[in-house]
Image: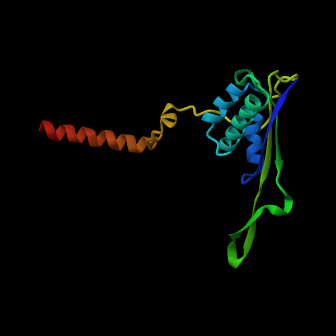
Amino acid sequence: MPQAVAHLRFVRTAPRKLRRVADAIRGRSVREALVVLKFAEVFAAEPIEKLVRSAVANASNNHDMNADELYISRITVDGGPGGRFTKRLDPRAQGRAAFKRKRLSHVTVVVSESPPAKPRKKAAGASVQAARSTRRAAGEAPAKGGRKRTAARRRAAAAAAGAASESKEG
């Protein structure tokens, strides 16, 4: 069975963050995976979405595959070179400093026309989900919740409202 491959190397995102997104689309159809990636509220979804689109373009141009019937047969996220991560200083207490290691990743996507032989395994841990709130999807700010009132505050508010209505009547 023909397969098309796309590689993304030296991504400036930690492999752990990218694996979370990769696990969400592994084994799905390309159309379904692109929808998940488009509406995922995860920063790491954008580079993987570009890579899946690149793999689809490779399949249609180089291997004459039908782009509508492709499946993500394999997606792997590997760590970048060990000594190559960028180091940043993080100030700590009492004039000390600690290193932050900004990790790199390599991502590989393989697409094919046949669905994967094994069914998708439900991965443990955090998953990637689409935005649930319609306000967030539309770009609006979420509604702010009011402050919870205690019983004493409720009584004081009721007394103030009652006093205001009595003063208007008299």
Residue 21: image quadrant is: top right
Toward the bottom, the furthest residue is 95
Task: Residue 84 in the image: state x and y as whole percent.
Answer: 81, 62
Looking at this view, is 161 or 134 the one in front? Answer: 134
Which quarter of the image is occupied by the C terminus?
Answer: top left
Residue 40: image quadrant is: top right
Q: In this view, does 164 lie to the left or right of 32?
A: left
Looking at this view, is 12 or 160 the one in front? Answer: 12
Which quarter of the image is occupied by the N terminus?
Answer: top right
From the viewer's perspective, is residue 167 above or below residue 102? above
Task: Residue 118 in the image: state x and y as whole percent.
Answer: 87, 23
Q: In this view, does 156 lie to the left or right of 9?
A: left
Toward the left, the furthest residue is 170
**Does residue 126 appear in this view?**
no
**Does residue 141 appear in this view?**
yes
Q: Residue at x 83, y 28 (%)?
A: 121
Residue 72: image quadrant is: top right
Task: Residue 166 in the image: state x and y as whole percent.
Answer: 18, 38
Q: Which residue is drawn at 84% across and 63% down?
A: 83
- How many badges with numbers are in the image? 0
Q: Which residue is drawn at 72% across and 27% down?
A: 30
Q: Residue at x 82, y 21 (%)?
A: 114
Looking at this view, is 165 or 21 the one in front? Answer: 21
Colour treatment of the image:
rainbow
Task: Residue 31 in the image: state x and y as whole percent.
Answer: 68, 26
Looking at this view, is 3 or 139 the one in front? Answer: 3
